[in-house]
Amino acid sequence: SYVLTQSPSVSVAPGETARIACGGNNIESKSVHWYQQRPGQAPVLVVQDDSDRPSGIPDRFSGSNSGNTATLTISRVEVGDEADYYCQVWDSSDSYVFGSGTKVTVL
Amino acid sequence: EVQLVESGGGLVQPGGLLRLSCAASGFLVNSDYMNWVRQAPGKGLEWVSIIYADGSTYYADSVKGRFTVSRDNSNNTLSLQMNSLRAEDTAVYYCARAYCPGDSCPFVSWGQGTLVTVSS
């Protein structure tokens, strides 16, 4: 089955830029979705189809997908962005796959 | 407004069974792709199952043959029947609505989750 690899953690100062990578074999051929999960809460979709933002998501959140890596970028990071972030794709075997998640800590 | 509310979680012994429900409002469960996703304590998200609008179903290998997803169109609810439960099934279970404007189907709505604990 398809595997998505994420770094366990990223630390960033307020106002700076956080980049969260999601690695997968030829991931650029897939549509990647990103979810934010704050502690004790359900996940929330923040980027869909590689780079589209759902309604209500700040434009500080953006995404890209090239080669074997998809990236979620959070610009002008705020304390409220501290959360776990997961990438997701649809696998050809009729199943969804999530990455292992990246914890973003705002210093 | 779209809302998903899970129920049915609790403590069950290994080998036991449990049925989860997800009450939907603001849309029809038979018109979208409905999913179950779980999260073990302190761990990441794991996709569990999907039921398509046409009624076809698919499962993660870890639950195949033990879990069954279904829906009740009259009550607009999604269910997950879990049999032969194991300690490793302990998790918060979320129902999630996938919306497919094109070829891909992101999970646009999630419930608050219900905790299943499998322990003797």
Image (spheres, coloured by chain):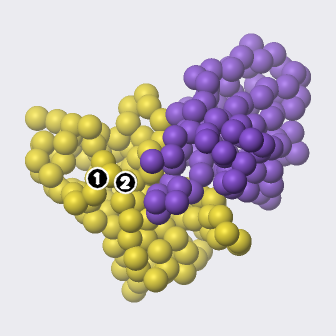
Chain colours: A purple, B yellow
Whether residue B97 is situated above or below residue B40 in the rendered picture: below
The amino acid marked with disc number 2 is: Ala
Identity of the residue drawn at 70% across and 32% down: A21
Cβ atoms at labels 1 and 2 below 8 Å apart: yes
Q: Position of residue A42 (x, y in %)?
A: 54, 45
Q: Nearer the viewer, residue B106 or B76?
A: B106
The amino acid marked with disc number 1 is: Val
Subunit bearing disc 1: B
**Pointer 2: what residue?**
B60
- B105 left or right of A13? left
**Pointer 1: what residue?**
B63
Q: Nearer the viewer, residue A38 or B65?
A: B65
Residue A80 figure quarter = top right
Q: How many marks?
A: 2
Q: Nearer the viewer, residue A50 or B72?
A: A50
Whether residue B2 is situated above or below residue A49 in the rendered picture: below
Q: Position of residue A1 (x, y in %)?
A: 45, 48
Q: Position of residue B44 (x, y in %)?
A: 48, 35
Q: Position of residue B87 (x, y in %)?
A: 21, 37
